[in-house]
Image (cartoon, grey):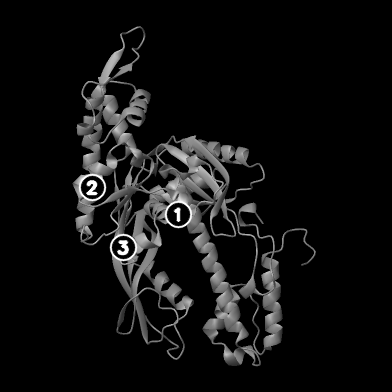
Amino acid sequence: MSLNEQTIQTNTNPTTMHHEQPIIVGLDIGTTKIAAIAGRKNEFGKLEILGFGRANSNGVEHGMVLNIDQTIKAIQAALEKCYESNPSLDIKEVYVGIAGHHIKSLQTRGDIVRQSIEEEIRQDEIDRLVADQYRTYIPLGDQIIDVIPQQFTVDNFQNIPNPIGYSGVKVGANFHIITGDKNAIRNINRSVEKSGLKTKDLVLQPLASAAAVMSEQDLEAGVAIVDIGGGTTDLAIFYEGVLKYTAVIPFGGENITNDIKLGLGVLRSQAEAMKVQFGSALSDETKSNIFITIPGLKGMSPKEISVKNLANIIQARMSEIMDFVSYHLKQAGLDNRNLNGGIILTGGGSQLKHLLQLTEYQTGLNARIGFPNEHLGGDHSEELAMPMYSTCIGLILKGYNDFENKNRQMADNFIKISELEGADIDEVATAEEIAAMEAQGVPVTKRKTLKEFMDSFKNNILEMFKEEGDTGF
Protein backbone atom coordinates (compact mmCIF):
# COMPACT_ATOMS: atom_id res chain seq x y z
CA MET A 1 0.00 0.00 0.00
CA SER A 2 1.48 3.36 -1.03
CA LEU A 3 2.06 6.19 1.42
CA ASN A 4 -0.38 8.47 -0.35
CA GLU A 5 -3.19 6.06 0.55
CA GLN A 6 -1.68 4.83 3.81
CA THR A 7 -4.12 4.11 6.60
CA ILE A 8 -2.52 3.63 9.97
CA GLN A 9 -5.23 2.74 12.44
CA THR A 10 -8.72 1.29 12.18
CA ASN A 11 -11.59 -0.24 14.13
CA THR A 12 -13.53 -3.21 12.88
CA ASN A 13 -16.68 -1.09 12.75
CA PRO A 14 -16.62 1.18 9.68
CA THR A 15 -19.34 3.39 11.13
CA THR A 16 -16.92 4.48 13.88
CA MET A 17 -13.68 4.14 11.93
CA HIS A 18 -10.94 6.42 13.18
CA HIS A 19 -7.73 6.43 11.20
CA GLU A 20 -5.02 8.71 10.00
CA GLN A 21 -6.04 10.56 6.88
CA PRO A 22 -4.41 9.54 3.58
CA ILE A 23 -1.79 11.65 1.85
CA ILE A 24 -3.26 13.13 -1.34
CA VAL A 25 -1.08 14.61 -4.10
CA GLY A 26 -2.17 17.31 -6.55
CA LEU A 27 -0.27 17.78 -9.82
CA ASP A 28 -0.82 21.04 -11.70
CA ILE A 29 0.54 20.79 -15.25
CA GLY A 30 0.52 24.43 -16.35
CA THR A 31 1.88 26.41 -19.26
CA THR A 32 4.54 28.18 -17.18
CA LYS A 33 4.99 25.86 -14.19
CA ILE A 34 4.41 22.32 -13.00
CA ALA A 35 3.68 22.00 -9.29
CA ALA A 36 3.31 18.91 -7.13
CA ILE A 37 1.92 19.31 -3.61
CA ALA A 38 1.33 16.50 -1.10
CA GLY A 39 -1.08 17.17 1.75
CA ARG A 40 -3.03 15.50 4.52
CA LYS A 41 -5.94 16.76 6.61
CA ASN A 42 -5.31 17.30 10.31
CA GLU A 43 -7.78 16.82 13.17
CA PHE A 44 -9.24 20.26 12.47
CA GLY A 45 -10.00 19.47 8.82
CA LYS A 46 -7.19 21.71 7.53
CA LEU A 47 -4.55 20.65 5.02
CA GLU A 48 -1.06 20.08 6.34
CA ILE A 49 1.42 20.36 3.47
CA LEU A 50 3.86 17.43 3.61
CA GLY A 51 5.77 18.03 0.39
CA PHE A 52 6.09 20.63 -2.34
CA GLY A 53 7.95 20.77 -5.64
CA ARG A 54 7.87 23.16 -8.55
CA ALA A 55 9.59 23.20 -11.95
CA ASN A 56 9.45 25.37 -15.04
CA SER A 57 7.06 23.92 -17.57
CA ASN A 58 8.25 23.02 -21.05
CA GLY A 59 6.17 21.33 -23.69
CA VAL A 60 2.83 22.83 -22.61
CA GLU A 61 1.10 25.58 -24.57
CA HIS A 62 -2.25 27.15 -23.74
CA GLY A 63 -2.77 24.48 -21.08
CA MET A 64 -2.27 21.58 -23.53
CA VAL A 65 0.60 19.08 -23.49
CA LEU A 66 2.26 19.23 -26.90
CA ASN A 67 5.74 17.84 -26.21
CA ILE A 68 5.38 14.76 -24.03
CA ASP A 69 9.12 14.22 -23.44
CA GLN A 70 9.68 17.77 -22.18
CA THR A 71 6.57 17.55 -20.00
CA ILE A 72 7.81 14.28 -18.46
CA LYS A 73 11.14 15.90 -17.58
CA ALA A 74 9.34 18.85 -15.96
CA ILE A 75 7.03 16.56 -13.96
CA GLN A 76 10.00 14.52 -12.77
CA ALA A 77 11.87 17.71 -11.79
CA ALA A 78 8.87 18.85 -9.72
CA LEU A 79 8.65 15.40 -8.10
CA GLU A 80 12.36 15.41 -7.23
CA LYS A 81 11.95 18.73 -5.44
CA CYS A 82 8.88 17.37 -3.67
CA TYR A 83 10.92 14.38 -2.45
CA GLU A 84 13.73 16.72 -1.39
CA SER A 85 11.28 18.60 0.81
CA ASN A 86 10.13 15.29 2.38
CA PRO A 87 12.23 12.17 1.62
CA SER A 88 9.68 9.89 3.34
CA LEU A 89 7.05 10.53 0.65
CA ASP A 90 6.12 7.69 -1.71
CA ILE A 91 4.00 9.21 -4.46
CA LYS A 92 2.19 6.74 -6.68
CA GLU A 93 -1.14 8.40 -7.56
CA VAL A 94 -1.96 12.02 -8.31
CA TYR A 95 -4.99 14.18 -9.02
CA VAL A 96 -4.26 16.14 -12.19
CA GLY A 97 -5.72 19.44 -13.37
CA ILE A 98 -6.84 19.86 -16.97
CA ALA A 99 -7.50 23.01 -18.99
CA GLY A 100 -7.03 24.25 -22.55
CA HIS A 101 -9.22 25.75 -25.23
CA HIS A 102 -10.35 22.25 -26.24
CA ILE A 103 -12.49 22.07 -23.07
CA LYS A 104 -16.23 22.39 -23.71
CA SER A 105 -19.38 21.97 -21.65
CA LEU A 106 -23.04 21.16 -22.24
CA GLN A 107 -26.22 20.86 -20.22
CA THR A 108 -28.26 17.64 -20.16
CA ARG A 109 -31.24 16.17 -18.33
CA GLY A 110 -31.60 12.66 -16.95
CA ASP A 111 -34.34 10.71 -15.11
CA ILE A 112 -34.80 7.18 -13.81
CA VAL A 113 -37.92 5.36 -12.65
CA ARG A 114 -37.19 3.69 -9.32
CA GLN A 115 -37.71 -0.04 -8.77
CA SER A 116 -38.16 0.05 -4.99
CA ILE A 117 -40.52 2.97 -4.49
CA GLU A 118 -41.35 1.91 -0.92
CA GLU A 119 -37.77 2.67 0.16
CA GLU A 120 -35.95 5.99 0.39
CA ILE A 121 -33.67 7.10 -2.44
CA ARG A 122 -30.18 5.65 -2.03
CA GLN A 123 -26.72 6.72 -3.22
CA ASP A 124 -26.44 3.84 -5.68
CA GLU A 125 -29.52 5.16 -7.51
CA ILE A 126 -27.90 8.59 -7.82
CA ASP A 127 -24.71 6.90 -9.04
CA ARG A 128 -26.73 5.10 -11.72
CA LEU A 129 -28.36 8.37 -12.77
CA VAL A 130 -24.93 10.00 -13.13
CA ALA A 131 -23.48 6.97 -14.95
CA ASP A 132 -26.26 7.19 -17.54
CA GLN A 133 -25.01 10.66 -18.54
CA TYR A 134 -21.67 9.21 -19.64
CA ARG A 135 -23.59 7.76 -22.59
CA THR A 136 -24.54 11.25 -23.77
CA TYR A 137 -23.74 11.85 -27.43
CA ILE A 138 -20.72 14.13 -27.90
CA PRO A 139 -18.75 15.01 -31.06
CA LEU A 140 -16.32 12.45 -32.44
CA GLY A 141 -12.85 12.95 -31.00
CA ASP A 142 -14.10 14.33 -27.68
CA GLN A 143 -14.31 12.56 -24.33
CA ILE A 144 -16.40 13.21 -21.23
CA ILE A 145 -14.18 14.40 -18.36
CA ASP A 146 -16.78 14.98 -15.66
CA VAL A 147 -20.53 14.84 -15.06
CA ILE A 148 -21.69 17.30 -12.40
CA PRO A 149 -25.28 17.06 -11.08
CA GLN A 150 -27.12 20.32 -10.55
CA GLN A 151 -30.61 20.55 -9.03
CA PHE A 152 -32.40 17.23 -8.56
CA THR A 153 -36.10 16.53 -8.88
CA VAL A 154 -38.18 13.85 -7.14
CA ASP A 155 -41.56 13.38 -8.83
CA ASN A 156 -43.04 16.93 -8.87
CA PHE A 157 -40.62 18.42 -6.33
CA GLN A 158 -38.03 20.71 -7.93
CA ASN A 159 -34.62 22.19 -7.02
CA ILE A 160 -33.59 19.55 -4.48
CA PRO A 161 -29.87 19.83 -3.65
CA ASN A 162 -29.56 16.22 -2.40
CA PRO A 163 -32.37 13.70 -2.95
CA ILE A 164 -30.95 10.91 -0.75
CA GLY A 165 -33.54 10.05 1.89
CA TYR A 166 -36.47 11.33 -0.19
CA SER A 167 -39.24 9.01 -1.33
CA GLY A 168 -40.77 8.95 -4.80
CA VAL A 169 -41.35 7.14 -8.08
CA LYS A 170 -39.01 9.11 -10.36
CA VAL A 171 -35.76 10.92 -9.60
CA GLY A 172 -33.97 13.15 -12.09
CA ALA A 173 -31.48 15.97 -12.40
CA ASN A 174 -29.97 18.58 -14.65
CA PHE A 175 -26.31 17.91 -15.42
CA HIS A 176 -23.30 19.98 -16.41
CA ILE A 177 -21.11 17.78 -18.61
CA ILE A 178 -17.49 18.75 -19.27
CA THR A 179 -15.73 17.34 -22.34
CA GLY A 180 -12.26 17.55 -23.79
CA ASP A 181 -10.27 16.45 -26.81
CA LYS A 182 -9.26 12.77 -26.59
CA ASN A 183 -5.73 13.43 -27.84
CA ALA A 184 -5.18 16.22 -25.33
CA ILE A 185 -6.40 13.97 -22.50
CA ARG A 186 -4.25 11.11 -23.78
CA ASN A 187 -1.15 13.32 -23.81
CA ILE A 188 -1.70 14.31 -20.19
CA ASN A 189 -2.23 10.71 -19.08
CA ARG A 190 0.82 9.49 -21.02
CA SER A 191 3.02 12.22 -19.53
CA VAL A 192 1.88 11.30 -16.01
CA GLU A 193 2.23 7.55 -16.54
CA LYS A 194 5.69 7.83 -18.13
CA SER A 195 6.72 9.86 -15.08
CA GLY A 196 6.04 6.76 -12.98
CA LEU A 197 2.66 7.93 -11.65
CA LYS A 198 -0.97 6.96 -11.99
CA THR A 199 -3.68 9.53 -12.72
CA LYS A 200 -6.26 9.05 -9.99
CA ASP A 201 -8.60 11.56 -11.62
CA LEU A 202 -8.61 14.46 -14.09
CA VAL A 203 -10.20 17.61 -12.65
CA LEU A 204 -11.13 20.75 -14.56
CA GLN A 205 -8.76 23.43 -13.29
CA PRO A 206 -11.34 26.17 -12.56
CA LEU A 207 -13.31 23.69 -10.42
CA ALA A 208 -10.18 22.77 -8.49
CA SER A 209 -9.33 26.45 -7.99
CA ALA A 210 -12.90 27.17 -6.91
CA ALA A 211 -12.69 24.48 -4.22
CA ALA A 212 -9.54 26.12 -2.87
CA VAL A 213 -10.69 29.76 -2.72
CA MET A 214 -14.48 29.65 -2.41
CA SER A 215 -16.42 29.54 0.86
CA GLU A 216 -19.96 28.32 1.60
CA GLN A 217 -21.06 31.95 1.73
CA ASP A 218 -19.67 32.54 -1.77
CA LEU A 219 -21.52 29.48 -3.05
CA GLU A 220 -24.78 30.71 -1.57
CA ALA A 221 -24.38 34.29 -2.80
CA GLY A 222 -23.36 33.37 -6.34
CA VAL A 223 -19.84 33.93 -7.59
CA ALA A 224 -17.63 33.74 -10.68
CA ILE A 225 -14.16 32.21 -10.27
CA VAL A 226 -11.66 33.65 -12.78
CA ASP A 227 -8.40 31.68 -12.72
CA ILE A 228 -5.75 33.55 -14.73
CA GLY A 229 -3.04 31.05 -15.57
CA GLY A 230 -0.06 31.15 -17.88
CA GLY A 231 -1.73 29.87 -21.04
CA THR A 232 -5.47 30.17 -20.34
CA THR A 233 -7.98 32.00 -18.16
CA ASP A 234 -10.48 29.54 -16.69
CA LEU A 235 -13.99 30.52 -15.63
CA ALA A 236 -16.46 28.76 -13.32
CA ILE A 237 -19.78 30.37 -12.36
CA PHE A 238 -21.75 29.21 -9.32
CA TYR A 239 -25.33 30.27 -8.62
CA GLU A 240 -27.93 29.07 -6.11
CA GLY A 241 -25.44 26.63 -4.66
CA VAL A 242 -24.57 24.77 -7.88
CA LEU A 243 -22.16 25.03 -10.78
CA LYS A 244 -23.98 26.83 -13.59
CA TYR A 245 -21.34 27.45 -16.25
CA THR A 246 -17.72 26.78 -17.17
CA ALA A 247 -15.51 28.20 -19.91
CA VAL A 248 -11.84 28.34 -20.90
CA ILE A 249 -10.57 31.62 -22.37
CA PRO A 250 -7.49 30.99 -24.58
CA PHE A 251 -5.41 33.87 -23.16
CA GLY A 252 -3.32 34.18 -20.02
CA GLY A 253 -0.16 35.57 -18.52
CA GLU A 254 2.05 34.21 -21.30
CA ASN A 255 0.13 36.29 -23.85
CA ILE A 256 0.81 39.43 -21.83
CA THR A 257 4.51 38.57 -21.65
CA ASN A 258 4.67 38.01 -25.43
CA ASP A 259 2.82 41.30 -26.05
CA ILE A 260 5.43 43.15 -23.96
CA LYS A 261 8.27 41.37 -25.73
CA LEU A 262 6.99 42.32 -29.17
CA GLY A 263 5.67 45.76 -28.28
CA LEU A 264 8.79 46.98 -26.50
CA GLY A 265 11.43 44.98 -28.37
CA VAL A 266 12.92 43.21 -25.35
CA LEU A 267 13.86 39.65 -24.45
CA ARG A 268 11.20 37.36 -23.11
CA SER A 269 12.90 37.11 -19.71
CA GLN A 270 13.05 40.92 -19.54
CA ALA A 271 9.39 41.19 -20.51
CA GLU A 272 8.38 38.75 -17.74
CA ALA A 273 10.49 40.59 -15.14
CA MET A 274 9.00 43.96 -16.10
CA LYS A 275 5.47 42.58 -15.98
CA VAL A 276 5.95 41.20 -12.48
CA GLN A 277 7.88 44.10 -10.99
CA PHE A 278 6.45 47.17 -12.72
CA GLY A 279 3.32 46.00 -14.54
CA SER A 280 -0.13 47.51 -14.05
CA ALA A 281 -3.51 46.67 -15.56
CA LEU A 282 -4.53 50.37 -15.61
CA SER A 283 -2.38 52.85 -17.51
CA ASP A 284 -4.20 55.78 -15.89
CA GLU A 285 -2.76 54.71 -12.53
CA THR A 286 0.85 54.95 -13.74
CA LYS A 287 3.03 58.04 -14.12
CA SER A 288 4.34 59.00 -17.54
CA ASN A 289 7.69 60.23 -16.25
CA ILE A 290 8.92 56.89 -14.82
CA PHE A 291 11.21 54.74 -16.95
CA ILE A 292 12.79 51.29 -16.66
CA THR A 293 16.37 50.88 -17.87
CA ILE A 294 17.06 47.64 -19.75
CA PRO A 295 20.69 46.56 -20.34
CA GLY A 296 21.73 46.65 -23.99
CA LEU A 297 22.75 43.52 -25.89
CA LYS A 298 26.39 42.90 -26.84
CA GLY A 299 27.68 46.37 -26.10
CA MET A 300 24.60 48.22 -27.32
CA SER A 301 23.31 51.17 -25.35
CA PRO A 302 20.79 50.50 -22.56
CA LYS A 303 17.13 50.89 -23.49
CA GLU A 304 14.69 53.00 -21.51
CA ILE A 305 11.12 51.72 -21.27
CA SER A 306 8.23 53.91 -20.19
CA VAL A 307 6.18 52.37 -17.39
CA LYS A 308 3.16 54.05 -18.98
CA ASN A 309 3.75 52.21 -22.26
CA LEU A 310 4.19 48.97 -20.36
CA ALA A 311 0.83 49.50 -18.63
CA ASN A 312 -0.88 50.29 -21.95
CA ILE A 313 0.22 46.93 -23.38
CA ILE A 314 -0.87 45.01 -20.28
CA GLN A 315 -4.22 46.80 -20.07
CA ALA A 316 -5.04 46.04 -23.70
CA ARG A 317 -4.65 42.29 -23.19
CA MET A 318 -6.32 42.20 -19.76
CA SER A 319 -9.25 44.20 -21.12
CA GLU A 320 -9.64 41.58 -23.84
CA ILE A 321 -9.68 38.80 -21.23
CA MET A 322 -12.28 40.65 -19.13
CA ASP A 323 -14.40 41.21 -22.24
CA PHE A 324 -14.50 37.42 -22.60
CA VAL A 325 -15.48 37.10 -18.93
CA SER A 326 -18.34 39.57 -19.45
CA TYR A 327 -19.44 37.71 -22.57
CA HIS A 328 -19.59 34.38 -20.74
CA LEU A 329 -21.49 35.95 -17.83
CA LYS A 330 -24.14 37.06 -20.33
CA GLN A 331 -24.15 33.62 -21.97
CA ALA A 332 -24.85 32.13 -18.55
CA GLY A 333 -27.69 34.60 -18.03
CA LEU A 334 -26.04 36.01 -14.91
CA ASP A 335 -24.98 39.58 -14.26
CA ASN A 336 -24.36 41.90 -11.33
CA ARG A 337 -27.96 41.48 -10.14
CA ASN A 338 -27.50 37.76 -9.66
CA LEU A 339 -23.91 37.24 -8.51
CA ASN A 340 -23.88 38.90 -5.10
CA GLY A 341 -20.50 37.33 -4.37
CA GLY A 342 -18.95 39.06 -7.37
CA ILE A 343 -15.77 37.81 -9.02
CA ILE A 344 -12.94 35.97 -7.31
CA LEU A 345 -9.65 36.34 -9.19
CA THR A 346 -7.04 33.64 -8.64
CA GLY A 347 -4.11 32.07 -10.44
CA GLY A 348 -0.66 33.55 -11.03
CA GLY A 349 -1.95 36.38 -13.22
CA SER A 350 -4.42 37.61 -10.60
CA GLN A 351 -1.78 39.58 -8.72
CA LEU A 352 -1.22 42.17 -11.41
CA LYS A 353 -1.39 45.63 -9.89
CA HIS A 354 -4.74 47.41 -10.35
CA LEU A 355 -6.37 44.31 -11.87
CA LEU A 356 -9.21 44.43 -9.34
CA GLN A 357 -10.14 47.95 -10.45
CA LEU A 358 -10.07 46.96 -14.14
CA THR A 359 -12.21 43.88 -13.44
CA GLU A 360 -14.83 45.86 -11.52
CA TYR A 361 -14.90 48.58 -14.18
CA GLN A 362 -15.42 46.18 -17.10
CA THR A 363 -17.77 43.65 -15.52
CA GLY A 364 -19.74 45.83 -13.09
CA LEU A 365 -19.14 43.23 -10.36
CA ASN A 366 -17.24 43.48 -7.10
CA ALA A 367 -13.91 41.65 -7.24
CA ARG A 368 -11.36 40.26 -4.81
CA ILE A 369 -8.28 38.06 -4.91
CA GLY A 370 -8.83 34.42 -3.94
CA PHE A 371 -6.14 32.84 -1.77
CA PRO A 372 -6.15 29.11 -0.89
CA ASN A 373 -5.06 29.78 2.71
CA GLU A 374 -8.55 29.18 4.16
CA HIS A 375 -8.05 25.43 3.81
CA LEU A 376 -4.40 25.30 4.87
CA GLY A 377 -3.10 24.47 8.34
CA GLY A 378 -1.27 27.11 10.32
CA ASP A 379 2.25 25.85 9.60
CA HIS A 380 2.24 26.25 5.81
CA SER A 381 4.76 28.45 4.01
CA GLU A 382 3.60 31.83 2.76
CA GLU A 383 4.47 30.82 -0.80
CA LEU A 384 1.88 28.04 -0.88
CA ALA A 385 -0.88 30.47 0.10
CA MET A 386 -0.33 32.39 -3.15
CA PRO A 387 -3.07 32.33 -5.82
CA MET A 388 -0.81 30.51 -8.30
CA TYR A 389 -1.18 27.34 -6.19
CA SER A 390 -4.97 27.46 -5.91
CA THR A 391 -5.42 24.72 -8.51
CA CYS A 392 -2.95 22.37 -6.81
CA ILE A 393 -4.52 22.87 -3.37
CA GLY A 394 -7.97 22.37 -4.90
CA LEU A 395 -6.84 19.07 -6.45
CA ILE A 396 -5.94 17.78 -3.00
CA LEU A 397 -9.35 18.87 -1.71
CA LYS A 398 -10.97 17.00 -4.60
CA GLY A 399 -9.05 13.88 -3.57
CA TYR A 400 -10.33 14.22 -0.02
CA ASN A 401 -13.87 14.68 -1.25
CA ASP A 402 -13.60 11.36 -3.12
CA PHE A 403 -12.05 9.66 -0.10
CA GLU A 404 -14.73 10.90 2.31
CA ASN A 405 -17.56 9.97 -0.07
CA LYS A 406 -16.16 6.46 -0.35
CA ASN A 407 -15.97 6.15 3.44
CA ARG A 408 -19.50 7.49 3.80
CA GLN A 409 -20.86 4.98 1.31
CA MET A 410 -19.02 2.17 3.10
CA ALA A 411 -20.56 3.26 6.39
CA ASP A 412 -24.03 3.46 4.81
CA ASN A 413 -23.65 -0.06 3.46
CA PHE A 414 -22.55 -1.29 6.87
CA ILE A 415 -25.61 0.27 8.54
CA LYS A 416 -27.87 -1.19 5.91
CA ILE A 417 -26.39 -4.66 6.35
CA SER A 418 -26.63 -4.32 10.13
CA GLU A 419 -30.39 -3.81 9.82
CA LEU A 420 -30.71 -7.28 8.29
CA GLU A 421 -29.90 -9.03 11.57
CA GLY A 422 -31.90 -12.13 12.32
CA ALA A 423 -32.69 -13.11 8.73
CA ASP A 424 -31.07 -15.02 5.90
CA ILE A 425 -29.37 -12.80 3.37
CA ASP A 426 -31.35 -14.03 0.38
CA GLU A 427 -34.62 -13.42 2.21
CA VAL A 428 -33.98 -9.73 2.99
CA ALA A 429 -31.61 -8.50 0.28
CA THR A 430 -32.60 -7.87 -3.32
CA ALA A 431 -30.51 -9.18 -6.19
CA GLU A 432 -29.32 -5.63 -6.83
CA GLU A 433 -28.18 -5.25 -3.22
CA ILE A 434 -26.36 -8.57 -3.26
CA ALA A 435 -24.62 -7.55 -6.51
CA ALA A 436 -23.52 -4.29 -4.88
CA MET A 437 -22.07 -6.20 -1.93
CA GLU A 438 -20.18 -8.52 -4.27
CA ALA A 439 -18.85 -5.50 -6.21
CA GLN A 440 -17.25 -4.29 -2.98
CA GLY A 441 -15.44 -7.59 -2.58
CA VAL A 442 -17.83 -8.99 0.03
CA PRO A 443 -18.47 -12.73 -0.63
CA VAL A 444 -22.23 -13.36 -0.57
CA THR A 445 -23.64 -16.88 -0.63
CA LYS A 446 -27.29 -17.87 -0.86
CA ARG A 447 -28.86 -18.81 2.49
CA LYS A 448 -25.82 -17.55 4.43
CA THR A 449 -26.87 -16.44 7.89
CA LEU A 450 -26.39 -12.81 8.79
CA LYS A 451 -23.80 -13.63 11.47
CA GLU A 452 -21.66 -15.47 8.92
CA PHE A 453 -22.12 -12.64 6.46
CA MET A 454 -21.14 -9.98 9.02
CA ASP A 455 -18.01 -11.91 9.99
CA SER A 456 -16.88 -12.07 6.37
CA PHE A 457 -17.68 -8.37 5.89
CA LYS A 458 -15.55 -7.39 8.90
CA ASN A 459 -12.67 -9.56 7.68
CA ASN A 460 -12.73 -7.78 4.32
CA ILE A 461 -12.64 -4.39 6.04
CA LEU A 462 -9.57 -5.49 8.01
CA GLU A 463 -7.84 -6.75 4.88
CA MET A 464 -8.34 -3.38 3.14
CA PHE A 465 -6.26 -1.58 5.75
CA LYS A 466 -3.64 -4.26 6.45
CA GLU A 467 -0.06 -3.46 5.42
CA GLU A 468 2.34 -6.13 4.14
CA GLY A 469 3.97 -7.81 7.08
CA ASP A 470 1.08 -7.11 9.46
CA THR A 471 0.17 -10.15 11.54
CA GLY A 472 -3.03 -8.83 13.02
CA PHE A 473 -4.82 -5.99 14.70
Q: Earlier in the sequence, mark 3 or mark 2?
A: 3
* Residue 118 left/right relative to 137: right
Disc 1 residue crowd, few under 14, some 14–19, many 20+, Cα 10 Å: some
* Contact, mark 3 vs mark 2 (Cβ under 8 Å): no
Please determine whether, in this image, residue 156 is positioned above or below residue 395.
below
Residue indicated by mark 2 = 360
Image quadrant holding the C terminus, namely bottom right
Please determine whether, in this image, residue 378 is positioned above or below residue 255.
below
Q: Which of marks 1 and 2 is in front?
A: 2
Q: Which of marks 3 and 1 is nearer the N terminus?
A: 1
Question: Which percent across, then down, holds residue 181?
Answer: 36, 51
Q: Which residue is at 47% across, 38% downward?
A: 71
Residue indicated by mark 1 = 202
Q: What element carries label 1?
A: strand
Question: Which percent across, then down, holds residue 293?
Answer: 31, 16
Please determine whether, in this image, residue 167 is positioned above or below residue 458.
below
Q: Is mark 3 on a helix, strand or loop?
A: helix
Tell which residue pokes out farthest to the top in this image.
Answer: 299
Residue indicated by mark 3 = 221
Q: Which residue is at 41% across, 86% downward?
A: 167
Q: Identify the image quadrant of residue 271.
A: top left
**Three-letter residue code for mark 2:** Glu
**Three-letter residue code for mark 1:** Leu
Q: Is mark 2 on a helix, strand or loop?
A: helix
**How many numbered callouts?**
3
* Residue 414 left/right relative to 317: right
